[in-house]
Image (tube, rainbow, N blue to C red):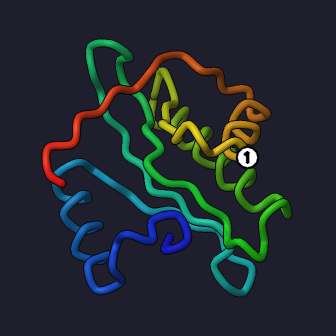
């Protein structure tokens, strides 16, 4: 996860995960082959716009193991998990400059549905 979220200090990581787990149902899933190869952070939520859906906060494969299918395998597991949970949709946001990630998601039959707007409240 440190490869995807380098701004999160190692000593703060567990506390953040615990807070998000308690307040938002955040879960971690990972794929191993003797060691961690890919990890995902996600939550099942419900809103008026989309009904019940799985929101994928984080998905990363270890840089030395990219293009070996680990991220795709974990992604496919998340889709099945969402179906089993009765989700109607599967959502994520991806920064505009992450072209490789966009190609991956488009190859997984996702489509670009909306713009995400943000306002920084602290510097």
On screen, residue 68 versus residue 109, left or right, reads right
Q: Report the number of discs.
A: 1
Above or below for 50 versus 59? above
Above/below status of 12 relative to 117: below
Left or right placement of residue 81 versus residue 99 in this view: left
Q: Residue furthest top?
A: 49
Quarter of the image where one finds residue 22: bottom left
Q: Quadrant of the C terminus?
A: bottom left
Identified at 65% across, 21% down, the residue is: 111
Give the crowd class for mark 1: few <14, some 14-19, many >=20 residues within 10 Å. few
Percent x, y of residue 13: 32, 75
Q: Is residue 91 above or below residue 26?
A: above
Nearer to the camera, 39 or 121: 121
Q: Residue at coordinates 73% horizontally, 26% vertically from top-left? A: 109
Residue 65 position, x and y percent, is 78, 72
Question: Residue placed at 49% from the left, 74% from the top?
Answer: 2
Q: Position of residue 38 (x, y in %)?
A: 64, 67
The residue under the point 66% across, 55% down is 74
The residue beneath circle 1 is 100
């Amino acid at each position: 996860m440190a490869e995807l979220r380098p701004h999160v200090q190692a000593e703060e990581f567990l506390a953040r995960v615990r807070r998000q787990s308690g307040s938002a149902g955040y879960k971690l899933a990972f794929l191993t082959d003797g060691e961690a190869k890919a990890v995902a952070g996600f939550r099942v939520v419900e809103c008026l716009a989309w009904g019940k859906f799985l929101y994928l906060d984080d998905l990363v494969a270890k840089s030395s193991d990219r293009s070996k299918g680990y991220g795709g395998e974990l992604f496919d597991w998340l889709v099945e998990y969402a179906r089993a949970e009765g989700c109607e949709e599967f959502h994520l946001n991806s920064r505009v400059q992450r072209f490789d990630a966009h190609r991956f998601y488009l190859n997984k039959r996702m489509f670009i549905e909306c713009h995400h707007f943000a306002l920084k409240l602290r510097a």
